[in-house]
Image (cartoon, rainbow, N blue to C red):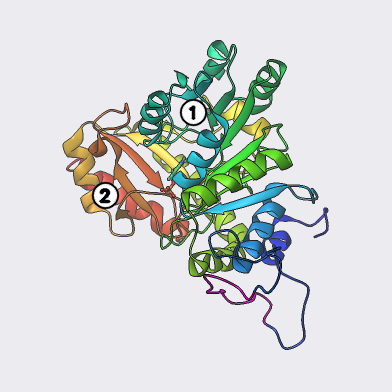
Amino acid sequence: MAEHWGDGTRAVRAGLPEPVKYEPALPGPVFAAHYHLPGDPTGPYTYGRDENPTWTHLERAVGELEAPGDAGARTVVFASGMAAVSSVLFSQLRAGDVAVLPDDGYQALPLVREQLEAYGIEVRTAPTGGDAQLAVLDGAKLLWLETPSNPGLDVCDIRRLVAAAHAGGTLVAVDNTLATPLGQRPLELGADFSVASDTKGMTGHGDILLGHVTCRDAALAAAVRRWRKITGAIPGPMEAWLAHRSLATLQLRVERQCANALVLADALAGRDDVTRLRHPGLPGDPSHKVAAGQMRRFGSVVSFVLADREQAERFLDALRLVDDATSFGGVRSTAERRGRWGGDAVPEGFIRFSVGAEDPDDLVADVLRALDAAAGR
Ligand SMILES: *Cc1c(COP(=O)(O)O)cnc(C)c1O
């Protein structure tokens, strides 16, 4: 994989093996619980929970996107984003260690926190915005960042937090789900782990769950891989293959969806019934300056607040091109009233909008019409 290639070239070729006569470009999924293994049990393929050739291709592909030009980067794929998140936290932290988490991150993090604390790990939290996690870093073993944060879309300065963390011997992991590696490359910004739910924009069709961890350090990667073996949180070969196939269109999807998100955010900015509009790509957004210094694309999520729960529900009900559904990063736009889950500290009228790959004019027209309908105009 040539280092100077653009994102589109890199995405369509990512992880492809050397051409073999009469073989497909991307070999099909390998369904195997075990492999022929006479004699001493040396790898690479021995037992299905440890290794699978379909994972190997996908892991190479993700590595080429997360750390272009770095042949030493190692990726481990998981059955879901949470399996990937847990593999880093639970493989690295021991009783008596301190972990710093964001208090405005993914909604399953509070559950993770409870479990860490049950194992005798001290957990400190602080908001993502304003690099507030710096203030609680002292003596920590691991700093967990999620930027942009989900669903609030605050951004922290990864380089700055990494510098402070590494100065104190603290490892840094970044949940890169929202940005995807085409939007942000945490390892290049100094992080030790780039972690993601590939259920979202990475695969982009809303039809599989998957996750990955990429790191440069061989010992850290080995610990994550060992955790996968112990917990058995392995992806199915079919899911891994579908994910690899989806990566070929990653640049097309991300480019279109990020452009659409900016167009939609601009259209929403002119509405008096829309408040607290957030998107890191908007020049006036509180996140924009830091985001522009570390992101190459600003993501496909836009958030805003409508008057109250009723108005938000009327809005979602009136949309035709946008499904009322959770998750984000898919080619079909979705939106939801985030407060319905009860886990995030958001107002009742808070909408998290995941912008898809529709024609921007169609999408904006649908959204403006639904806003009018919700406002009784
Ligand atoms: C969805 C999500 C996860 C969890 O991923 P799953 O694939 O649902 O397990 C973790 N972090 C972020 C930021 C997410 O959006």
Q: Look at the numbered discs 2 and 1 and tell me whether their residues touch, using CB distance below 8 Å.
A: no
State which tag comes first along the sequence, 2 or 1.
1
Quadrant of the drawing holding the N terminus: bottom right
Numbered tag placed on residue 330 in the rendering: none
Mark 1, secondary structure of its residue: loop
- Tag in front: 2 or 1: 1
Q: What amino acid is found at the position of numbered circle 1 in the picture?
A: Asp
Residue at image location 48% in from the left, 36% down from the top: 279
Q: In the depicted view, which residue is nearer to us: 288 or 331?
A: 331
Q: Is residue 222 visible?
A: yes
Q: Residue at x 30, y 52 (%)?
A: 325
> Residue 167 lies in magenta, yes or no?
no
Q: Main secondary structure of the magenta part?
A: loop
Residue 76 placement (x, y as % from top left): 61, 51
Quarter location, residue 296: top right
Identify the residue shown where x is 72% and y is 88%. Answer: 22
Magenta span of residues: 24-36
Residue 216, placed above or below residue 366: above
Residue 370 numbered tag: 2
Of residues 158 and 114, the one drawn nearer to the viewer in this rendering: 114
Relative to 128, does residue 209 appear above or below in the rendering? below
Q: Quadrant of the C terminus?
A: top left
Q: Give the residue at mark 1.
A: 154
- The kind of secondary structure element at disc 2 is helix
Residue 28, position as x, y percentages in the image: 59, 77
Mark 2 is on which residue type? Ala
Q: Is residue 63 left or right of residue 349?
A: right
